[in-house]
Image (cartoon, coloured by chain):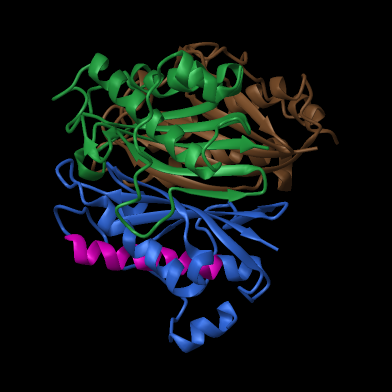
Chain colours: A brown, B green, C blue
Amino acid sequence: MSFDAVLAEKKIELPQAMAPRVKIRPFVRAGNVIHLSGQVCQWNGEIRYVGKLGQEFGIDEGYQAGRLCSLNLVAQLRRALGGSLDSVVQCIRIGGYVNSMPTFSDQAKVINGCSEVMTEIFGEAGEHARTAIGVAVLPFNAAVEADAIFEVR
Amino acid sequence: MSFDAVLAEKKIELPQAMAPRVKIRPFVRAGNVIHLSGQVCQWNGEIRYVGKLGQEFGIDEGYQAGRLCSLNLVAQLRRALGGSLDSVVQCIRIGGYVNSMPTFSDQAKVINGCSEVMTEIFGEAGEHARTAIGVAVLPFNAAVEADAIFEVR
Amino acid sequence: MSFDAVLAEKKIELPQAMAPRVKIRPFVRAGNVIHLSGQVCQWNGEIRYVGKLGQEFGIDEGYQAGRLCSLNLVAQLRRALGGSLDSVVQCIRIGGYVNSMPTFSDQAKVINGCSEVMTEIFGEAGEHARTAIGVAVLPFNAAVEADAIFEVR
């Protein structure tokens, strides 16, 4: 089944691929590798989780925030590929950044939200290398941000 | 116009490409891709902005600190390319790290300083994917650090 | 001398290449480039340094924690390459993440522990571009985490 068909089959809705708020690119392709800019946990431009893990939010909300980041990454990727995801070969890497109180150390469980969206859509091609860290703060005080690198045909 | 000529035309002065303070490399090339080491906001070895955004510094100073990081990245890139920037194809990605109080969430405006240096010098070839995060602290308590990936011929 | 022989000659023992605690991959290869997932300062699954630099730990312990991260990176790399390190061409980049109190700014000295393991094993092929940052917290409250990119044959 094509990745586009998986989106429909699993009823996974993607947000709009938003233009960056500053003059940067949401994606750059070099050869068969696409680098995607960091995406925060927003839906069509509205940040859904504003605050820190370990203070405003717990693991469950963080996980949902993580899922949102990946949906935005996939929306940008689809735009980068001209509207279809079917030339995706592999998700190479995800960088996951969790807006964390210094005492919150469950970044892995939060970034699992990012990771599981990728495997839901791409199957084995969605399995990636990953680095998850807890940062002092994120742009717009978003709870989670993630970036990604994909190999494409 | 060549990128080297743009530097002269816009009177953009680059700092010295400093040797790293430890035994690492300021750049590594693999195929047509160059990874540049993180550069802090220094000029010829003197860190110009020491402290945190939201405490010692506001957005305007952070923006200037961000510009300094990119000037050092370009200085290293020029050295990596044997003294001329003209084989640059594209700035693929910038990672921007802002030494932030947990309440400061304008990382994007700070890292715009990094980004705008790239587009001033390279035009469209300077437009990049980007991730900006707020970190607890940086080496030497520098206000801003940035790294970059470039595609070259 | 082969890199595998260097391990024996220098009596550098690698830990087990642990399976990730979540469904991600410890490494992904795309072309001749391998991205390694972030590795914390653990030995065979037991995190050896739990806490923050500038609070629980000083530079010397941080350096040792950094070494552990790199040993785990090399263990994963060896597994990625089918049991031998001898197809390594170059360590391209290390990202070093130090669990830091906001006042601790010696991240470079801590991440030197990561870097020196690479040059001990791979010589010039272990010299890399690097970014070191101080983060608010890390998964499992580990003191240090590092990821890496390698070029291989």
A10 in the magenta segment:
no
Residues shaded magenta: C58-76
C69 in the magenta segment:
yes
Q: Which image quarter: residue A62?
A: top left
Residue at 35%, 16% in the rendered image: B109
Dominant SS of magenta comes to helix
Q: How many labels does the image show?
A: 0
Q: Which residue is nearer to you in this view: C67 or B125? A: B125
Residue at 26%, 60% in the rendered image: C50
Q: Is residue C131 left or right of residue B153?
A: left
Question: Residue A91 location, x and y as percent?
Answer: 66, 42
Q: Can residue B123 be seen in this view?
A: yes
Q: Which residue is nearer to you in this view: A115 or A82? A: A82
Q: In this view, does C93 lie above or below A52?
A: below
Residue at 51%, 71% in the rendered image: C122
Residue at 74%, 27% in the rendered image: A7
Q: Can residue B133 be seen in this view?
A: no
Question: Residue C74 location, x and y as percent?
Answer: 51, 68
Question: Residue A27 location, x and y as percent?
Answer: 61, 25
Q: Which image quarter: residue A34?
A: top right
